[in-house]
Image (cartoon, rainbow, N blue to C red):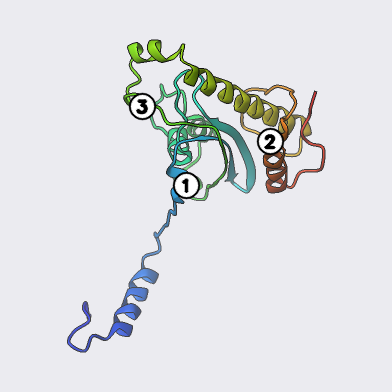
Amino acid sequence: RWYGMGRQGNKERFLTLGSSIMSDNLKYNQLQIPGAMLLPGFSIYLLELNIQGEKQYYVGMTGDPYYPSARAAFHRISGHLELLDRSTQNQLKKVLDKLELTDEDIADVNIIMHHFPIEGYQKWELTKSFKKEEMERVRNSAEYGAYKKRQRQIKALEDALIYGLKKSGQVHILNKTRGKKGNVQPEFEGLVASIGEVLKLDPGWIVNN
């Protein structure tokens, strides 16, 4: 076999050999991560799982209810697949575990993350550990108050989405919580419409008060 370009520098021959090697390697996968999904910030996301030919969905958000932290989308889905049993964030892994899938079944699972960034998150100059003393210092600050206000708005949106999707009966939602009926703020109407388009839902699926 020829493993280099040689004196002739025959690039075409090199690429042909490379293609041959690739075609022989059937166990090839590719993961492409947009840089925007590595940036921390508030967001709503929809995980679409195709498991044994059935589509199932999980609705989530980024924006911690206590710490002023909003994980990047890729970090969030990584948490969903955390292997530790005691983890409180690996809901997706627990769903797959309950199905008792074989390795061959898991290899055929397809997961898509639909990510909808929401403005309003400001990075905090706190240590990565978010020590107790620091949190006591910032919890009474105006900045923390603004964070919590925005976080609650997005949490209310997440609840409304889960409630509306479950109530519609048009898709299989994996979330254990029932969600909550609530009004969707005007700034989120475009996001809600986009989710409806992704899921191909009938009009009026979201339930307002």
* Residue shown at the point (57%, 32%) measured from the top left: 60
Relative vertical location of residue 167 with respect to residue 192 in this rendering, above or below: above
* Residue 178 figure quarter: top right
Q: Which residue is mark 1?
A: 36
Looking at the image, do the residues carrying marks 2 and 3 touch, with CB atoms under 8 Å apart?
Answer: no
Q: Amino acid at mark 1?
A: Ala
Q: Secondary structure at mark 3?
A: loop
Q: Residue at x 82, y 42 (%)?
A: 203
Query: Which one is in front in this view, the residue at disc 1 or the one at disc 2?
Result: 2
Residue 89: image location, x then y, percent? 47, 27
* Label 1: element kind: helix
Marks 1 and 3, Cα distance to the nearest angstrom? 21 Å
Q: Earlier in the sequence, mark 1 or mark 3?
A: 1
Label 2 residue SS: helix
Query: Would residue 62 be seen by someone viewing this image from the given angle?
Result: yes
Front position among marks 1 and 3? 3
Considering depth in this image, is 101 or 71 the residue closer to the camera? 71
Q: Pointer 2: what residue? A: 187
The numbered mark at residue 125 is: 3
Total numbered circles: 3
Identify the residue at image location x=43%, y=53%.
31
Q: Quadrant of the C terminus?
A: top right
Q: Where 203 sits versus 139, above or below? A: below
Q: CA distance from mark 2 to mark 3?
A: 28 Å
**Residue 195, image x, y percentages:** 68, 42
How far apart are the alpha carbons under marks 1 and 2? 21 Å
Q: Which amino acid, by three-letter code, is at mark 2?
A: Glu
Q: Which mark is residue 191?
A: none
Amino acid type assigned to the residue bearing label 3 in the image: Glu
Residue 176 visible in this rendered orientation of the protein: no
In terms of image quadrants, where is residue 40? Answer: top left
